[in-house]
Image: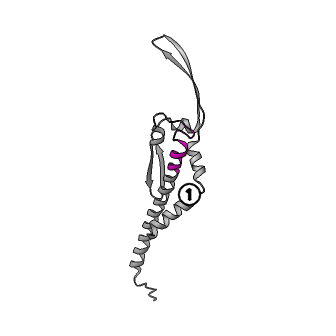
Amino acid sequence: MSQGLRIVGIDRLERRIANLERRTLRAATDACVAGITHIRDVMQNQFLNGSGVIGRDSGKLQDNWNIRAETAKAILWTDTVYAHAHEYGFHRVQSIYSKKHRRWFIRRQNIKAKRFLRGAIKRSRSKLPEIMGETFRRSLFGF
């Protein structure tokens, strides 16, 4: 009967691997947040500041962008309902009944696609590996 191989100190090694895994996931999340933050800043400063693609009326489209961090990813989102229409365009003919005038009116909506988010991603693409890599190393190793 063979007794097999017994490794002494395996518990310590398992704890170190589990700790490294947690630190790696945290570092990956931090890197994703840094990348998304850079994209949001480029979008707000170069595309949504009134001199860029979209004029600024209330500032809601510029100011209402949030970042939600999840495990090894980050999500950039807004609750501004017309952000999609400005990003991708919106063309619609709508019939509206006026109770006051007791007749139908035709309303045409033509919003051209502005590409503020896609433009910011395209403009940021060259810097993202450097920003995210540096944040990952700093978060994982502490320097």
Is residue 12 shown left or right of residue 32?
Answer: left
Q: Dividing the image into 4 quarters, which one contains the C terminus?
A: bottom left
Residue placed furthest toward the top? 102
64 over 133 or under it: above or below: above
Q: Residue at x 59, y 46 (%)?
A: 119
Q: Residue at x 58, y 45 (%)?
A: 118
Q: Dividing the image into 4 quarters, which one contains the N terminus?
A: bottom left
Its colouring scheme is one colour
70 over 84 or under it: above or below: below
Magenta span: 39-54
Foreground of the two, 36 or 4: 36
Q: Position of residue 2 (x, y in %)?
A: 46, 88
Dividing the picture into quadrants, the one containing residue 112 is: top right
Foreground of the two, 35 or 72: 35
Q: Residue at x 44, y 54 (%)?
A: 69
Q: Position of residue 68 (x, y in %)?
A: 44, 51
- Tally of marks: 1
136 over 65 or under it: above or below: below
Q: Is residue 45 magenta?
A: yes
Amino acid type of the residue that numbered disc 1 sits on in the rendered structure:
Leu
Residue placed furthest toward the bottom? 1
Q: Position of residue 139 (x, y in %)?
A: 45, 65
Q: Residues within 10 Å of mark 1 (few under 14, many from 20)?
A: some
Dividing the picture into quadrants, the one containing residue 19 is: bottom left
Is residue 10 shown left or right of residue 109?
Answer: left
Q: Position of residue 41 (x, y in %)?
A: 50, 49
Q: Is residue 115 magenta?
A: no
Dividing the picture into quadrants, the one containing residue 53 is: top right
70 over 65 or under it: above or below: below
Is residue 128 shown left or right of residue 63?
Answer: right
User: In what element is the residue under mark 1?
Assistant: helix
The residue indicated by pointer 1 is 128
